[in-house]
Amino acid sequence: MLTKMESEQRIIRLQKELQEKEIDGALFIYPIDVYYFAGTRQNSALWIPAQGNPFLLVKKSYSRARVESVISDVRPFPSSKEFAAQFAADVKKVGFTFDVAPVQQYNFYLKLLAGREFVDISAVNRDIRSVKSDWELAQMRNSGAKVCEVYRQVPQFLKEGMRELDMAAEFECRLRKAGSEGYVRMRAYNQELFLGLCVSSATAGNPGFFDGAVTGRGLSNAAPHGASTEVMPADTALLLDYAGIFNGYIVDMTRVFVIGKLAPELEHAFATSLAIQKYLVENLKPGAICEELFLKAAEMAAAAGLAQNFMGAPGENAKFVGHGCGLELDEFPVLAQGFKVPLKAGQTLAIEPKFVLPGIGVIGIENTFAVSSEGGVKLTDMPDDIVYV
């Protein structure tokens, strides 16, 4: 669980940013942000002043929040008439996370704190959360070790004639039994994911809404991603792309399994994936520019004759090759065109060079790494090799 010292360090970093931007405090209502600073995911609003001590206003469950919160000042959520009285009279400018606050909630709090100016601190919040402490890195190493144990079990139950759904159910059952929490939290609007993806050549060419290289067909138009009821063909790639989530912290990981042999086109694409990953990992160092890493990866894919298949089916390509992860699957930074910011030590990214070859299959690799002066430190530490069953 989150420690008081860990929470205090996070709050100090935020308060420094608030002071520099002349913002009087930050009001958090998004549950994972509340959890990040307070250590409880109960339905609450968290106030962190630019100077002084924070307090937590709890809607439900107050009794559980009092036990879980590492912030000492925990109060029941007040009535609308009493809400403004919780804040000092000199609070004029309120930081708010516009990236995740529904308009209805924004208007609700704007009314409760009438006369105050609300300003967007989404980027500040995400930047702070992108750099992981030693405590957080330990959580992610633990998540990595546990999800790797489940991947190692795949040859025990992968059989010819299985449906994608059967394979997914078996993997997900074992992942849950290992203690994975299942909440693949994403900050981006209109994105959702049920545990992970199990995709074979039977559905490899199916595009979809999910902002990733691989989507899969899914089970219906209401859930159009992930495993389908199609039988997984032999002599092609089965791609398992799953998140391991333990104590809230997410690592993202992909491995490829084959019953039989692999087509030469997929072997070539996989070798290219490994080469791209190797280059990126060697350059996951503080100061490296995210956009430049993405452009180099795209250049390597083009040199291999796979530009149209890089990070998705032709015409449906995802626009990144790596994404931050932590308490959410889509944290900062992003290795993408237009993301012209330098990496920082302690940031964690899932690197996932993948290729989709319609009619042939889908293939690639994904691991989660921490940025360090020596390059990427692997947190999903098991061999990257294709596993033949």
Image (cartoon, helix red, strand yellow):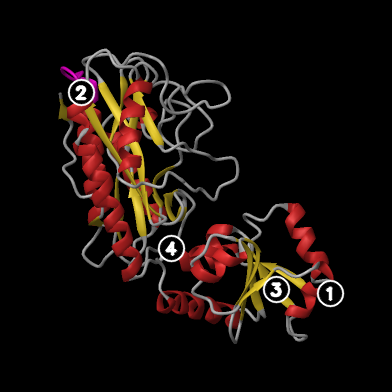
- Is 289 placed above or below 7 here? above
Q: Amino acid at mark 3?
A: Val
- Front residue of this view, candidates 115 and 211: 115
- Front residue of this view, candidates 382 and 299: 382
- Indicate which disc residue 94 carries: 3
Quarter occupied by residue 383: top left
In x, y percent, where is residue 304?
26, 32
- Front residue of this view, candidates 319 and 147: 147
- Indicate which disc residue 115 carries: 1
Q: Amino acid at mark 1?
A: Gly
Q: Count how many numbered circles sit on residues in the image.
A: 4
- N-term mark: 3 or 2: 3
Report if residue 67 lies within the magenta region: no
**The C terminus: image quadrant:** top left
- N-term mark: 4 or 1: 1
Can I make out residue 334 in this image?
yes
